[in-house]
Image: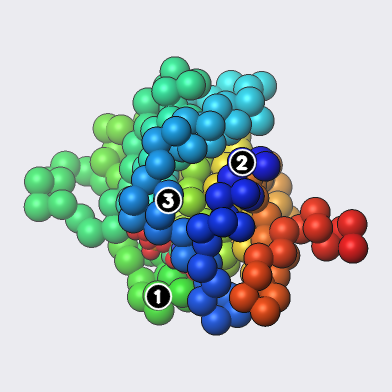
Amino acid sequence: MELLKQRIREEGHVLGDKVLKVDSFLNHQIDPVLMMEVGEEFARRFADAGVTKILTIESSGIAAAMTAALKMDVKVVFARKKKSALMNEEVYMTKVHSFTKNETNEVTVLKKFLGANEKVLIIDDFLANGEAAMGLAHLVEQAGSEVVGIGIVIEKAFQDGGKRLRQHGFKVESLARIAAFTDGQVQFVEECVQA
Ligand code: G4P
């Protein structure tokens, strides 16, 4: 998605050799116009998947999931990383370890919002090691529903999450795929293929 890549080039800050900071439009401040385009692109790419529900994880996945849901006319549920004091009903739970943050969260979703026989599209902002997406897929499995696709805004293709999810048989669509950070610059996968 060219517009997204342009924003990453213009506003992204590379931290070390593994992390991209995009807090001006995705991870802190949110650009709603860009997010609408992101949602429309996900809706286009998964138009034939028969999606009945979108599942994401708090917090930065919510904006993209919301605009995709609007376009696909389905509800969006976000899994919680910390159990709300008000969540005194039955939940599905899985543990998700973040290598980036070096912490493990018990990720939960209320059973009443993730029923059986749904066709679920998982959406998240970043794909690194694939832990969050695998955890969300595990919640869907517990509910007796099917993951029909995984939509990622920014995939760091040099980490093994994408490979892991695709090997598992999931259809993964990433709107921007980063091959490497070279001298503080973002190199997209397509640019490496052309080089
Ligand atoms: P994984 O799920 O693919 O295994 O990724 P990992 O655990 O390594 O990532 C954990 C958190 O770090 C996630 O956010 C993920 O979106 C974020 N993250 C990973 N790599 C990058 C990166 O290069 N840049 C930025 N900006 N974020 C990255 P989170 O903990 O869920 O935070 P939030 O959604 O509440 O913002």
The quarter of the image holding the C terminus is bottom right
Judging by the rendered image, the residue that carries numbered circle 2 is 3
Please tell me which of labels 1 and 2 falls first in the chain: 2
Q: Nearer the viewer, mark 1 or mark 3?
A: 3
Judging by the rendered image, the residue that carries numbered circle 1 is 101
Instruction: Give the distance between the C-alpha atoms of the residues marked 1 and 3, in whole angstroms.
Output: 18 Å
Q: Secondary structure beneath disc 2?
A: helix
Give how far across and how far down residue 102 sits, in percent: 40, 79
Q: Would residue 33 be found to the left or right of residue 86 on screen?
A: right
Judging by the rendered image, the residue that carries numbered circle 3 is 26
Instruction: Give the distance between the C-alpha atoms of the residues marked 1 and 2, in whole angstroms.
Output: 29 Å
Q: Nearer the viewer, mark 1 or mark 2?
A: 2
The quarter of the picture showing ligand 1? bottom left
Give the amino acid at mark 3: Leu
Front residue of this view, candidates 50 and 128: 128
Residue 118 visible at all: no
Q: Is mark 1 within 8 Å of ligand 1?
A: yes
Give the amino acid at mark 2: Leu
Residue at (34, 37) in percent of width and height: 77
Mark 1 Cα-neighbour bin, 10 Å: few <14, some 14–19, many ≥20: few
Q: Secondary structure beneath disc 1?
A: loop
Mark 2 Cα-neighbour bin, 10 Å: few <14, some 14–19, many ≥20: few
Q: Would residue 71 be found to the left or right of residue 189 on screen?
A: left
Front residue of this view, candidates 101 and 41: 41
Residue at (63, 25) in percent of width and height: 44
Residue at (50, 41) in percent of width and height: 122
